[in-house]
Amino acid sequence: MVESGISAATRPVDADLCTPFLAQLRVTGVAVSMFGGAASETLVCASDPLAARIDELQFDLGEGPRWEALRTRLPVLVPDVHDTSPFSWPVFSKAVLETDAAALFVFPLTVGALDLGVVELHRTKPGNLSHADHAAAGALAGQTAWQLLRRVLSVNSPDTDPAVEAALMSRREIHQATGMVLAQAGVSAADALLLLRAHAFANALTLRETADEVLLRRLSFAPRNDQHGNGELQ
C-alpha cells in the first residue's frame, strides 16, 4: 500500500479541530481542509499520514468526494472504496485503492451561505456510518465550521481590535444589516456580524460595503435550499 507522511506544506496547524471527530465517532482517521473564498486551499489538520494522503490525492487530482461535498453542500458517503459506482471519480477511485482506506465519509463545512471547506473521515474497514454517527458528524461539522470562521477572521480581519469594533457597532447601517442577517441565517447578533465580516474578508470588501449589499437586498445569508442526491445516508 502507498502512503505518504505529512509534508511541511500539509502539516497540521490546528490538530484540536480533528480530535472531537476521533473521540466521538467510530472512524479511523480525519482531516479538516479549508478552501475557497477566505483562504487558499489549506489542510488545517490531519490525524495521521493516511488522512493527509487522502486529502492530498483529491487536491492533486481535482476529483473525489471532497469536491462532490463542496458542490452539493451535502455529505458524501463511500462505505466501500471498491464500489464508487454512484459517482464519477475514475482517477481518484483507482488511486485510493493504493492506500489502506476502505471507507470515506466527507461532510461540508458551511456557515449559512458560506462554504468554508470539508471534513474528511475514513475507516480502514468497509461499512457505512450508523445513523447516530452520521448525525454526530453533521453536528461536529457545523461546530468546526464556526471555529474555522472565527479563527481565520481573528487572524485576518482588521475589525478585531476592540476600539475598531466599538466604532463599527455604532454605525447604523451595520446594525441594520446585522439584524437582517440575523433573521436570514437564524443566528445570534454576534454571529450575524461575524458572517458579514467573513463575506467582506472573502471578497476583499469593507464591512460597510458588505452591509450596503445586504441592505440593498443584493446579498442574502439565508441557507440554500436543501438538496437531495447521491451520498446521503440511507
Image (tube, rainbow, N blue to C red):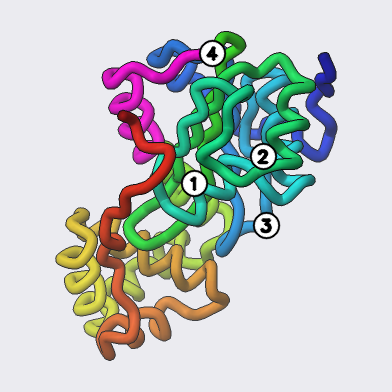
Q: In the displayed structure, does residue 126 sit left or right of residue 55? A: left
Q: Amino acid at mark 3?
A: Ser
Viewer-closest of 107 and 196: 107
Density class for disc 1 (Cα within 10 Å; few <14, some 14-19, many ≥20) is many
Distance from the alpha carbon under mark 2 to that under mark 1 = 16 Å
Count of residue discs: 4
Contact between marks 2 and 1 (CB within 8 A): the answer is no
Q: What is the distance, in whole Å, between disc 3 and disc 4 at their CAs?
A: 32 Å
- Contact, mark 3 vs mark 4 (Cβ under 8 Å): no
At x 71% / y 20%, what residue is drawn? Answer: 50
* Disc 1 residue type (three-letter): Ala
Q: Marks 1 and 4, Cα distance to the nearest angstrom? A: 20 Å
The x, y position of residue 42, in whole percent, is 67, 46
Q: Position of residue 112 (x, y in %)?
A: 32, 58
Tell me if mark 3 has few (under 14), some (14-19) or many (20+) residues whose alpha carbon lies within 10 angstroms of its own: few
What segment is highlighted magenta in the picture?
126-143
Structural distance between the alpha carbons of marks 1 and 3: 17 Å
Label 4: which secondary element: loop
The disc placed on residue 69 is 1
Query: Does the segment drawn in magenta span residue 99?
Result: no
* Earlier sequence position, callout 1 versus callout 4: 1
Q: Earlier in the sequence, mark 2 or mark 1?
A: 2
Is label 2 in a helix, a strand or a loop?
A: strand
Give me the residue at 44% from left, 11% from top: 26
Q: Which residue is mark 4?
A: 126
Which quarter of the figure is the N terminus placed in?
top right
- Please give the label number shown on residue 40: 3
Mark 2 and mark 4: Cα distance apart in space: 25 Å
Tell me the residue that label 2 is attached to: 43
